[in-house]
Amino acid sequence: KAGVTQTPRYLIKTRGQQVTLSCSPISGHRSVSWYQQTPGQGLQFLFEYFSETQRNKGNFPGRFSGRQFSNSRSEMNVSTLELGDSALYLCASSWITGYEQYFGPGTRLTVT
Amino acid sequence: AQTVTQSQPEMSVQEAETVTLSCTYDTSESDYYLFWYKQPPSRQMILVIRQEAYKQQNATENRFSVNFQKAAKSFSLKISDSQLGDAAMYFCAYRSINTGTASKLTFGTGTRLQVTL
């Protein structure tokens, strides 16, 4: 069974732009969670989607948003990028909310 | 809110030796899950082992085992017969069983493990 895939793997954007990251969960998994990893703040939970509905949200500004499609694939969007948004964005999928999460390889976003 | 603390930023172990990584956590909940994840230089987070708080028996997974002390809120990871491939960043993580927050993993700051010949 294929693992969690994330695209793109690397991205360079300019301050003020917006960006969309994509995550395809393991086949059969319906829950997708997003995390931000930075050297300063460590790993922080962004949000979780299950059956196309946001189930849980972390403490991030409204510039961070997401959605989930009927095939469980999820996208994360960051608008009006700031330098501090430079991070590794990790996506994790699980069968349903509360089950073990399996992570993708991440998308490295650099904001210049 | 739950917090997870890893007090060892870096550890080193010789190949074939045993090393223990420490983790403490703070929670007011009685039931929860604890995990150890490994993040090698490739950056992909890999689940190493999990422990359910209601189980008294410590989890084991091949060369990896935990020492779960619920009263002390301690959850250490022991790696036996260390291998070069064990070199990575190790994260301790907490997850509630409450439906509203069950999807959220709370991570510690990580311990970088170096394995030497």
Image (spheres, rainbow, N blue to C red):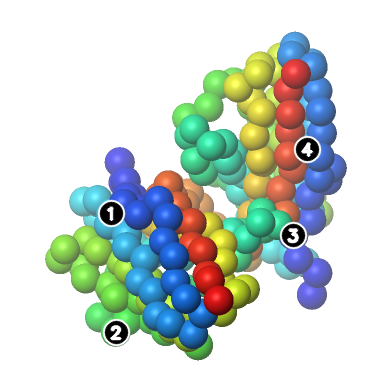
Q: Viewer-proximal residue, A68 or B10?
A: B10
Q: Pointers 1 and 3 in contact (CB under 8 A)?
A: no
Q: Tell me: B32 left or right of A88.
A: left
Q: Pointers 3 and 2 in contact (CB under 8 A)?
A: no
Q: Position of residue A42 (x, y in %)?
A: 49, 40
Q: Chain of mark 3?
A: A
Q: Looking at the image, can residue A36 be seen?
A: yes
Q: Residue at x 79, y 56 (%)?
A: A5
Q: Viewer-proximal residue, A93 or A42?
A: A42
Q: Pointers 3 and 4 in contact (CB under 8 A)?
A: no
Q: Amino acid at mark 1?
A: Tyr
Q: Amino acid at mark 3?
A: Val
Q: Tell me: A54 left or right of B78.
A: right
Q: Tell me: A43 left or right of A102.
A: left
Q: Position of residue B99 (x, y in %)?
A: 43, 53
Question: Which of disc 2 and disc 1 is earlier in sequence?
Answer: 1
Identify residue for label 3: A4
Q: Pointers 1 and 4 in contact (CB under 8 A)?
A: no
Identify residue for label 4: A21
Q: Looking at the image, can residue A99 be seen?
A: no
Above or below residue B94? Residue B70 is below
Q: CA distance from mark 3 to mark 4?
A: 13 Å
Q: Chain of mark 4?
A: A
Q: CA distance from mark 1 to mark 2?
A: 19 Å
Q: Amino acid at mark 4?
A: Leu
Residues at marks 3 and 2 on the same chain: no
Above or below residue A70? Residue B78 is below
Q: CA distance from mark 2 to mark 4?
A: 40 Å
Identify residue for label 2: B57
Identify residue for label 1: B25
